Amino acid sequence: MKIPVFGLVMIFVIWLSYELKKHTKEEAKTHKDFWERERKSGFIPRKSTSDIHYITITESFLPVDRGDDTSELNVLCKRILNFSDKKIADLSSMTNTELKEKYGTANFTSLSEADTNFTNLVPLLGRLCELLYEEGRLAEAETAALFCVDSGIMTYPVLYTLGNIYSVIDDKERLDQLISKAETQPSCQERTLNMLKALSSSSSSD
């Protein structure tokens, strides 16, 4: 027996209404659960932060010759060194609630500042790598880029610099090792990986 078109429409309307109500209830529950977690996290005592990887800024990876006081390189290095007395850590994979749950409310402010410092530092380090590479200072650019990679900073400017250096000096082994390492980092964007793979393919065809 065929169901009239009107009947099909009514069935669809009833189903749609049910799904909308179900979604609204689930959304309300998620919202309620979130605020309950947030409320409870405010009472969690201080916990150890020994598992956090802090980045330390020193002169070790910075170029010695930085030009005059007004040069971009010199200004950049000074801005980077301003972070030498600060706590720096990439905590972007965790929400504020998760930070408080794992490390305690008392640690939240300092951890939030460490994450903000990381966010502000990353573009400065990326530009440092780019600038040294642009000036043909490959050894110094590599030193700066390797510091970034070892610190877990796998941004496009950093890997573009390092990838191009390995391409220029025809070191495909290290280029492929860099690709393998980048593939294990959730923070490494797809376009960055594609750029490295294109460099590796170009080296293979030479």
Image: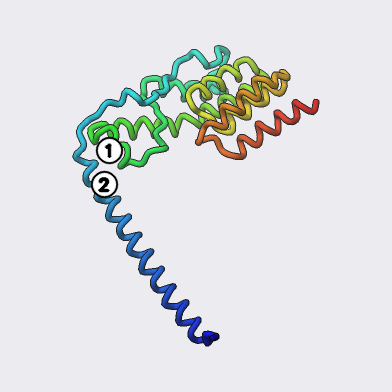
In this rendering, is residue 30 above or below 71? below
Tag 1, which secondary structure? Answer: helix
Q: Find residue 128 and report its image quarter.
A: top right
Position of the N terminus by quadrant: bottom right
- Evaluate whether residue 5 shows in this view: no
Disc on the earlier residue, 1 or 2: 2
Give amino acid for label 1. Answer: Glu
- Evaluate whether residue 205 shows in this view: yes
Residue 152 place in picture, x, y as percent: 49, 27
Query: Residue 37: which disc?
Result: 2
Query: Residue 101: which disc?
Result: 1
Q: What residue is shown at x 65% (from left), y 17% (from top)?
A: 137
Q: Give the CA separation, mark 1 to mark 2.
A: 9 Å
Q: Find residue 48 and report its image quarter.
A: top left
Give amino acid for label 2. Answer: Arg
In this rendering, is residue 120 above or below 171? below
